[in-house]
Image (cartoon, rainbow, N blue to C red):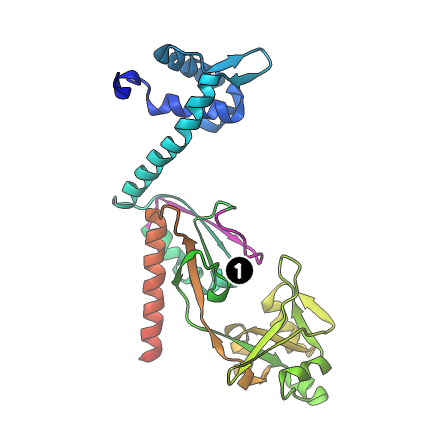
Amino acid sequence: MNPIHQFKGCDLLSLNVFLAVAAHASFREAGKELGITASAVSHSIKVLEQRLSVRLLNRTTRSVSLTDAGERLAATLRPALSSVAGALQEIDSFGGIPSGTLRINSSEGAVRLVLQPVLARFLRENPQVHLDIVCDGKLSDIVAHGFDAGIRLAEAVPQDMVSIRVGAPVRFAAVASPGYLAARGRPAVPEDLHGHDCIRFRFDSGAIYRWEFERHGNAETVNVNGPLTLTDQPLMVDAAIDGIGIAFVPDHLAASALSDGRLERVLDAWCPAYPGLCLYYSGHRHVSSALRALIAMLREALQNDVQHERA
């Protein structure tokens, strides 16, 4: 018999209900997942079993379990329905209006630099998209944690990800107040930092950032020490202004204090620019219309910034 005729009348909804019950071993929990009542779940399963002429579930007053036939059907349906969902999502990306929830993982600094300038415009132009942005410093596994994309410095993007440049090159600056430098002197090479008070940065993971320098192809990494450790880079700038010590922060965070003389650069020749921020996502997952729209807007913003700098 043709399998299509054999499954005639078994719609996708009833098959999804069955898979939800198989996953939760509970009509009530399956109903919560699907947004329907437990009695509606029970009715859907009963109708499905009648159409297939086979019992799929063993039911008692205390438990629900799969029969052998149910086990086999669930094992076959999971990849099949996943493929159907993926195909429908892919077709949706070719449709007109971006929609749905778009989950982005990023550091707070990256959000301020890259997303904040386009955030209002993106949401205004895509009213059916909900942005869910999670800021942390853990370099989270975006696939394992259910994110659609991440934004990080290019050097921190895993090699198996699709990476798209969305930010200009980033330069770090070692900075200190004039008062601190007058009292303690200026480091001439990175190793001199061991004799200075340094303001350290701690990642959310608990690791302390080791300062990285480079000059004429020679790279040096210094595990600095000092009286203060922070998890917020703007606070590091404030601490340097207060004369607590030398801070090593993204250049743009110290720009204002450098321009008005509250801070001065040290080891400037050892602070080259590095590849900037990238948006990245798994090449094995569907790229939604919402993510495509965000990528297009970020690329446009970067191009406008480059043209403005050249003008």
| Residue closest to the eye, 139 or 307 | 139
Where residue 142 appears, as percent x and y from the top left, is 49, 50
Where residue 253 appears, as percent x and y from the top left, is 53, 72
**Left-right relation of 31 to 61:** left
* Figure check: 116 above or below 18: below
**Left-right relation of 197 to 71:** right
Q: Is residue 239 magenta?
A: no
Where residue 291 appears, as percent x and y from the top left, is 36, 51
| Residue closest to the eye, 181 or 259 | 181
| Quarter of the rendering occupied by the N terminus | top left
**Left-right relation of 181 to 9:** right
- Look at the image and give the residue range highlighted in magenta: 126-143
Residue 31 makes an appearance in the image = no
Q: Residue at x 65, y 64 (%)?
A: 202
| Residue closest to the eye, 230 or 163 | 163
Badge 1 amino acid: Glu
Question: Which residue is under mark 1?
Answer: 108
Q: Quadrant of residue 223?
A: bottom right
* Figure check: 155 above or below 87: below
Q: Provide the major secondary structure of the magenta segment.
A: loop
Q: Residue at x 32, y 64 (%)?
A: 300
Q: Residue at x 56, y 11 (%)?
A: 60
| Quarter of the rendering occupied by the C terminus | bottom left
Q: Is residue 134 magenta?
A: yes
Where residue 220 appears, as percent x and y from the top left, is 60, 78
* Figure check: 113 above or below 248: above
Q: Residue at x 40, y 33 (%)?
A: 79
| Residue closest to the eye, 201 or 82 | 82
Residue 11 makes an appearance in the image = yes
Q: Quadrant of residue 296?
A: bottom left
Dot 1 alpha-carbon crowd within 10 angstroms: few under 14, some 14 to 19, many 20 or more: some
